[in-house]
Amino acid sequence: MAMAIDDLSVDAAAQIIRDRPRGGWEGVEDFLLHPRLNSIELNDAGRAQFSTSTRYYVLRAKVERDRAQEYSAALIEAGPGGAGVVVRRVFGAGASEYLL
């Protein structure tokens, strides 16, 4: 997001993602109404870079056995027909923080 919008910092982009409503935005126009974005002018080519559907999903797992715990996270890209492909995997404490 920060790469696509000149006047948007990485921190601001991260905050926008954290502010995302449960279930996501209804459409790109709703997304662009976010307070950090509504003052930024985007032409049609800039708007075309955004979509409210995703190809990527994050899977987080925590396995407990006796007193041991294992954490992992995976970034999965949805392919044709719904098949998923693991793009990246991270293991260990804080795995999901290091995924992206």
Image (spheres, helix red, strand yellow):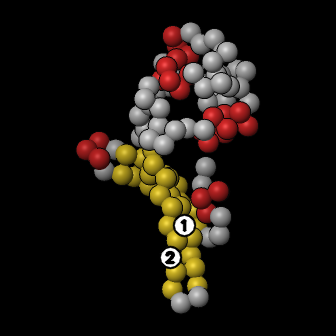
Q: Is residue 30 left or right of residue 85?
A: right
Q: Which residue is mark 2?
A: 63
Give the residue drawn at x 53%, y 90%.
66
Residue 53, position as x, y percentages in the image: 41, 34
Mark positioned earlier in the residue sequence (1 or 2): 2
Secondary element under disc 2, as helix, strand or loop, is: strand
Residue 71, position as x, y percentages in the image: 57, 70
The numbered disc on residue 22 is none
Q: Is residue 32 above or below residue 75?
A: above
Give the residue drawn at x 56%, y 9%.
43
Q: Which residue is mark 1?
A: 72
Q: Toward the viewer: 63 or 85?
A: 63
Q: Is residue 28 left or right of residue 99?
A: left
Q: Is residue 11 above or below residue 51?
A: below
Residue 3, position as x, y percentages in the image: 65, 28
Determine the CA span between mark 1 and mark 2: 9 Å
Q: Amino acid at mark 2?
A: Val
**Would you call the spot at circle 1 few (<14 residues within 10 Å), some (14-19), or many (20 or more)?**
some
Location of residue 32 by image quarter? top right
For the residues labelled 1 and 2, say whether their Cβ atoms are less than 8 Å apart.
yes
Q: Is residue 71 left or right of residue 93?
A: left
Give the residue drawn at x 34%, y 44%.
79
Q: Is residue 67 above or below residue 9?
A: below
Query: How many numbered callouts?
Result: 2
Give the residue drawn at x 60%, y 55%.
99
Q: Amino acid at mark 1?
A: Ser
